[in-house]
């Protein structure tokens, strides 16, 4: 189950995009 890892990566990407 790599859903957690994927979610973490997506969250980090969104934070970077917002910055």
Image (cartoon, rainbow, N blue to C red):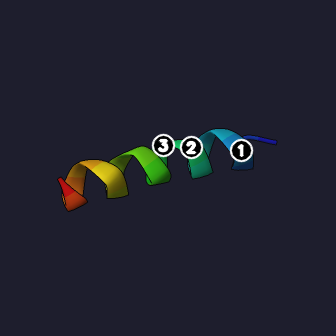
Give the residue at mark 3: 9
Quarter of the rendering occupied by the N terminus: top right
Q: Looking at the image, do the residues carrying marks 2 and 1 touch, with CB atoms under 8 Å apart?
A: yes
Q: Nearer the viewer, residue 17 or 2?
A: 17
Mark 3, secondary structure of its residue: helix
Task: Give me the C-alpha separation between circle 2 and circle 1.
Answer: 6 Å
Expressed as whole percent of the image width and height from the top left, the position of residue 18 reads 22, 61
The quarter of the displayed image where residue 17 is located: bottom left
Residue underneath mark 1: 4
**Contact, CB < 8 Å: mark 3 with mark 2?**
yes
Labels 3 and 1: the sequence-earlier one: 1
Q: Nearer the viewer, residue 16 or 9?
A: 16
Residue depicted at x 56% and y 43%: 8
Q: Is residue 4 left or right of residue 11?
A: right
Q: Residues within 10 Å of mark 3 (few under 14, many from 20)?
A: few
Residue underneath mark 2 = 8
Secondary structure at badge 2 equals: helix
The answer to whether 8 appears left or right of 12 in the picture is: right
Q: Nearer the viewer, residue 19 or 2?
A: 19
Q: As displayed, is residue 8 above or below residue 10? A: above
* Separation of residues labelled 3 and 1 (CA atoms): 9 Å
């Amino acid at each position: 189950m790599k859903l957690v890892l994927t979610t973490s990566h997506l969250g980090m990407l969104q934070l970077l995009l917002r910055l």
